[in-house]
Image (cartoon, coloured by chain):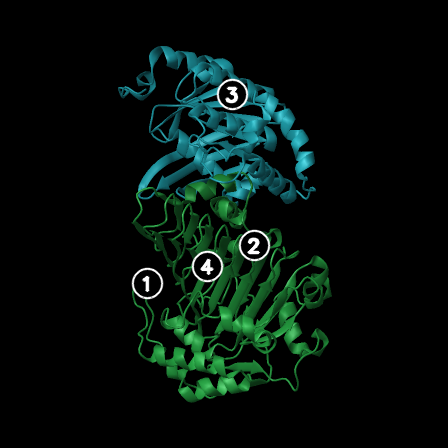
Amino acid sequence: MSSPVESLVNREYKWGFVTDIEADTVPKGLSEEIVRLISAKKQEPEFLLEWRLKAYRGWLKMTEPHWPNVTYPPIDYQDLIYYSAPRTQKPLGSLDEVDPKLLEAYTKLGIPLTEQKLLAGVAVDAIFDSVSVGTSYKKQLGAMGIIFCSFSEAVREHPELVRKYLGSVVPTSDNFFAALNSAVFSDGSFVYVPKGVRCPMDLSTYFRINAQNTGQFERTLIIADEGASVSYLEGCTAPKRDENQLHAAVVELVALDGASIKYSTVQNWYAGDEEGKGGIYNFVTKRGKAARGAKISWTQVETGSAITWKYPSVILQGDDSVGEFYSVAVVNGRQQADTGTKMIHIGRNTRSTIVSKGISAGRGNNSYRGQVKVLPKAAGARNYTQCDSMLIGNRCGAHTFPYIDVQNPTASVEHEASTSKIGEDQIFYLKQRGLNTENAISIIVNGFCKEVFKELPMEFAVEAQKLLGISLEGSVG
Amino acid sequence: MLDIKGLRASAGEKDILKGIDLTVKAGEVHAIMGPNGSGKSTLAQVLAGHPAYKVTGGTVTFDGADLLDMEPEERAQAGLFLAFQYPVEIAGVTNAYFLRAAYNAIRKARGEEELDPMDFLDILEEKLKLVEWGPEIMQRAVNSGFSGGEKKRNEILQMAVLEPKLAILDETDSGLDIDALRIVAEGVNKLRRPDRATIVVTHYQRLLDHIVPDYVHVLFDGQIVKSGGKELAHELEAKGYEWLTGVPEAVSA
């Protein structure tokens, strides 16, 4: 007899629908021609085309990284489509002009694109396949000098800012996937908060991959000028498909003197089925650069994707700057995650905090990989790392790869790690108190993740808790 | 209330319960005693539905329903409570949250309205007095860093909040000092009512000085070998289990 927990049926991935929408796509494969075609389709200025070409040429000489603790069949980069956009007749002036099918898709996702959400005070930019379909709340933000728009629009309207900051944190040559993204990215989000302005609402982007055989390569650039502050939320889903889809995004955060950027992600890309068929390869480069007295805080809840390769990092360049990384990574089924962070202490009295919670269930494999590097000039630098793993069942794995490199004697670096296992006993205890299996697991796991969830904005925290419950259904056995 | 007939259960290949017959009526307190390894705790766990044990024979009816056919949470919702010998720790979840979740899960299953945190707090304050605790315990994570005595008191607190029809106390006295033993026993006694029943599983007689049973049963090798009134416990205390089992008892703490 299987245990009562095991017999709980895995719930369907409820975001797995496909939207039937006319798309403008480029031919399969990657070449200099394709890069030029994408740039031309987007009517980009010369500097950007040159930047893309440089990235592409660099990419040709690079090889895919194989140091992460994940395995997957070779990716045929010539078999992918690098640009797909919902076909529209003319540039969109307002949300009313967005294809109703698109809005319907977002409604299904529960995405805040319409009035009701505006009332809730969240400004939303939505990326469907690769193109931004509507940015809400723009006028209100504009009055404060805050720019929140699609990346394409930023290229058109604010080329000087794009030119100055694009690639300033993640250069085209940074790594294989960042180079690929730089060559072919089609859209993304752009935020600029001017000097001394506190953005009065959370800014939010929703990413969705719809078209088949498409890679999604979005680019996000957030700049908080001196003394400015902003909180940014990012959510992601994709339809269920049997093929693997590639997602290689780049996010760059620039926090100038005294600025503060809080970046929260709830990632729920399709993870593939139980046998590991289909699902998103999430190969993402996220990095922020903190100037003097600036603070960058990453919070991520990673429940989706077949493979996650992601290390949101902070370069603590200015004196007294602060970097934080709060992460919950969940793997179930055949999911694999190799995720963590890098904290590079360059300035004096820089501080960083890392709290990582890895949950492994089913046949999932979860690795924390983190680097804390204190350079010679970073006197008084401090880091605290806490790295906890929770195992559910007997067939999953948890691994921790901390790299600590301290080159200044006045620095202090702490690392704590723990591994625990949810057993039948724990679940039985809660069931004996009247709670069903689903609630029992959810309570145990949420307790485990509490330190991270409290860093999330309220509405995201609620969503994350629900998501976690769903991701782990039927995971104990 | 509870009717056990010929109950047999095993863990893996090993038969542990070998035909238990026991009837518990409302208002009664039964003590199950016996040497280590006799199957006392297994009986408690099997009644609560622990998945590690397999029922291989017999029937158990609880308030007219087939208990063995119910999920553990359904048994709890029906009013069966097990005070664990080894209460489990749950990091990051406050006692207050956990207790309210359990309380509401049981109410919901009975078609009653769930209570919001404020209303629940009123109930909680009353119950805390029973175990002589202040409100600060409610903000600590469930059993995390609790001493052995605190864990047992927490079990009694949960029992007080959930108000079960049938409470099974599994070695609740083990690891308790005299004061904690008194608090736990008084808590249990205050919860005694004509419409409720209690099964006290214990190795030693001392808990039964505080919680006086109506019946005492001696379990040995998976079977009840002797039943009697409360005086049987005293007899056991004086003569040891060897008197009934014929097996010299190993020295235990």
Query: Residue at horizontal 49%, vertical 88%?
Result: A37
Which sits in the foreground, B25 or A277? A277
- For the residues bearing labels 3 and 2, Cβ distance under 8 angstroms: no
* Quadrant, the N terminus of chain B: top right
What's the distance in space between the residues labelled 4 and 1, CA to CA?
Answer: 24 Å
Describe the element under mark 1 as helix, strand or loop.
loop
The location of residue B189, given as percent across then percent down, is: 57, 19
What's the distance in space between the residues labelled 4 and 2, CA to CA?
Answer: 32 Å
Which of the two discs, 4 and 1, labels the residue nearer the N terminus?
1
Q: Which residue is mark 4?
A: A289
Q: Chain of mark 2?
A: A
Res A163 label? none
Which sits in the foreground, A433 or A154? A154
What's the distance in space between the residues labelled 2 and 1, CA to CA?
Answer: 29 Å
For the colour cyan, the matching chain is B
Describe the element under mark 3 as helix, strand or loop.
helix
Q: Chain of mark 3?
A: B
The amino acid marked with disc number 4 is: Lys
For the colour green, the matching chain is A
Describe the element under mark 4 as helix, strand or loop.
strand
Res A68 label? 1
User: Is residue A2 in view from this perspective?
Assistant: no
Res A466 label? 2
Q: Please identify, in this view, whether the residue under mark 4 or under mark 2 is nearer the observer.
A: 4
Q: Please identify, in this view, whether the residue under mark 2 or under mark 1 is nearer the observer.
A: 1
Question: In which quadrant of the rendered view does residue A151 lie?
Answer: bottom right
Q: Residues within 10 Å of mark 1 (few under 14, many from 20)?
A: some
